Amino acid sequence: MPAEHSGKRAKLTKHLSYEENNPNKIRALIGAFSRFNQLRFHAADGFGYDFLAEQVLRLDPLNPQAAARLVSVFNNWKKFDETHKTKMNDQLQRIVKTPKLSGDVFEIVSKALG
């Protein structure tokens, strides 16, 4: 991972107002980023997809329902151009292959993959 990406992650999740175990804060930050910041979420380097997958996998053992809600952003991945489809598919594969994945997240991801 390039150093610039770890800096972006730190800025997004290390703010004093962010609480990584509070579902409302997670939805407000991660959900808003992935649903409403289309420019950054769909960045050409795939940072947004990687960041979302990382957050889903971090959150899944703590709050599977919140993780499943977040990962549903990938549901329409097949409608994108080949470059974006490939990067989103890579993250979906990463998530679905994770040991001990919750049923909630597994269901959403496996349906998205078709």
Image (cartoon, rainbow, N blue to C red):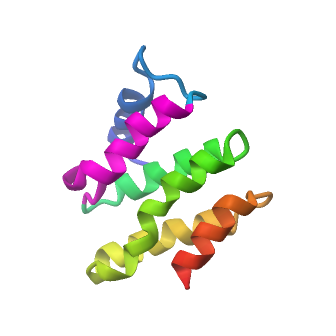
The residue lying at 39 percent from left, 74 percent from top is 77
Instruction: Please name the predominant secondary structure of the magenta segment in the image.
Output: helix
The residue lying at 19 percent from left, 54 percent from top is 39
Q: Position of residue 9 (x, y in %)?
A: 41, 36
Q: Which residue lies furthest to the top in this view?
A: 16
Decide whether residue 28 is among the magenta residues.
yes
Q: In this view, does 80 lie to the left or right of 57?
A: left
The residue lying at 51 percent from left, 65 percent from top is 91
Q: Where is residue 49 in the image (x, y as percent from the top left)?
A: 41, 58
Q: Which residue lies furthest to the right in this view?
A: 100
Q: Give the range drawn in magenta.
A: 23-43
Decide whether residue 37 is among the magenta residues.
yes
The residue lying at 35 percent from left, 28 percent from top is 11
Which is nearer the eye, 24 or 4? 24
Q: Position of residue 88 (x, y in %)?
A: 42, 69
Q: Kindly tell me whether residue 88 is visible in this rendering.
A: yes
